[in-house]
């Protein structure tokens, strides 16, 4: 008898469980980013490298799950939502891990000094972006319940409220990004141009963590609206 691949068996029980599993790993990955910046601010090169390696490992784990989902999501399996919609949500989830890895890579490839005036704002921005990703994970965790209720009723209303909260968090991170960039530009004359450019890129990437978390919610909101 041919053995049933583990993921096939998983999909047979719930096609959404691998989606939740992927988002959980992505959340673990982005949850390592604050430690990355703590190490940077503390000037702890060993901790910075360790944080990068941990992020790389989680990003690889997320990639493996993503690829398994792509390969094993049966085209013929009856799904209450379009297969393409699930894959689109998966793609946005995965970007969060990718951006986390990009941030870690840049911070370990070039030595960057953190202005004293940027430290508090930087930590606040990173933390709020991680919270946004946590909210996205909580929303994805509601997939099974949404399916059971046909994307209607009190469960759908509850998820819509969660998505609205996520949107508010993302808006707050936009304000934090703007404030941090203003601080950066106030000191640009005292910094070398390359560092200014890299910090501008880094701050944008941190904000992208929350942007992609918001997109996870928006994708799910589209499913509820149909």
Image (cartoon, rainbow, N blue to C red):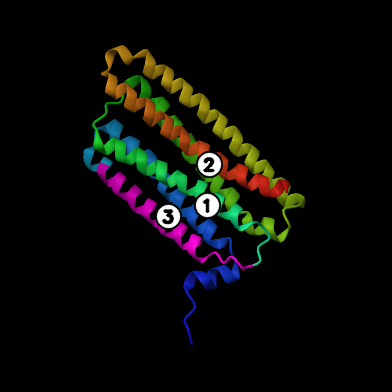
Provide the residue designation for mark 2.
213
Q: Residue at x 59, y 54 (%)?
A: 84
Give the vertical position of 179 relative to 71 (above or below).
above
Which circle's residue, 1 or 3, is located before the other in the chain? 3
Q: Are marks 3 and 2 in contact (CB under 8 Å)?
A: no
Nearer the observer: mark 1 or 3; the answer is: 1
Provide the residue designation for mark 3.
62
Q: Is residue 46 left or right of residue 224?
A: left
Check if residue 56 falls in the magenta segment.
Answer: yes
Mark 1 surroundings within 10 Å by alpha-carbon count, few (fewer than 14), some (14 through 19), many (20 or more): many
Image x and y of residue 68, in percent: 46, 63
Mark 3 surroundings within 10 Å by alpha-carbon count, few (fewer than 14), some (14 through 19), many (20 or more): many
Question: What secondary structure predominates along the stretch shown in magenta?
Answer: helix
Provide the residue designation for mark 1.
90
Give the vertical position of 111 relative to 157 (above or below).
above
Image x and y of residue 41, in percent: 30, 31
Task: Indicate the secondary structure of the residue bearing disc 2.
Answer: helix
- Give, as a single range, the part of the protein colored magenta: 49-77
Mark 2 surroundings within 10 Å by alpha-carbon count, few (fewer than 14), some (14 through 19), many (20 or more): many
Q: Residue at x 60, y 48 (%)?
A: 139
- Answer yes or no: is residue 167 visible: yes
Task: Indicate the secondary structure of the residue bearing disc 1.
Answer: helix
Image x and y of residue 199, in percent: 34, 26
Image x and y of residue 3, in percent: 47, 81
């Amino acid at each position: 008898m041919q053995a049933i691949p583990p993921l096939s068996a998983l999909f047979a029980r719930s096609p959404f469980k691998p989606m939740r599993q992927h988002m959980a790993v992505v959340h673990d990955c982005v949850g390592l980013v604050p430690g990355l910046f703590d190490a940077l601010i503390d000037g702890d090169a060993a901790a910075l490298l360790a944080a990068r390696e941990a992020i790389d490992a989680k990003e690889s784990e997320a990639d493996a799950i993503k690829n398994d989902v792509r390969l094993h999501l049966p085209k013929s399996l009856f799904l209450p939502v379009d297969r393409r919609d699930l894959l689109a949500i998966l793609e946005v989830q995965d970007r969060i891990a990718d951006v986390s890895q990009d941030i870690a890579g840049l911070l370990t490839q070039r030595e960057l000094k953190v202005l004293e005036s940027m430290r508090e704002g930087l930590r606040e921005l990173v933390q709020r972006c991680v919270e946004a990703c946590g909210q996205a994970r909580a929303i994805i965790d509601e997939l099974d319940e949404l399916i059971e209720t046909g994307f209607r009723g009190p469960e759908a209303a509850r998820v819509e409220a969660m998505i609205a909260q996520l949107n508010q968090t993302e808006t707050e991170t936009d304000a934090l990004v703007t404030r941090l960039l203003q601080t950066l530009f106030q000191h640009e004359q005292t910094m070398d141009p390359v560092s200014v450019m890299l910090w501008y890129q880094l701050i944008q990437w941190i904000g992208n963590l929350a942007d992609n978390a918001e997109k996870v919610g928006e994708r799910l909101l589209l499913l509820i609206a149909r």
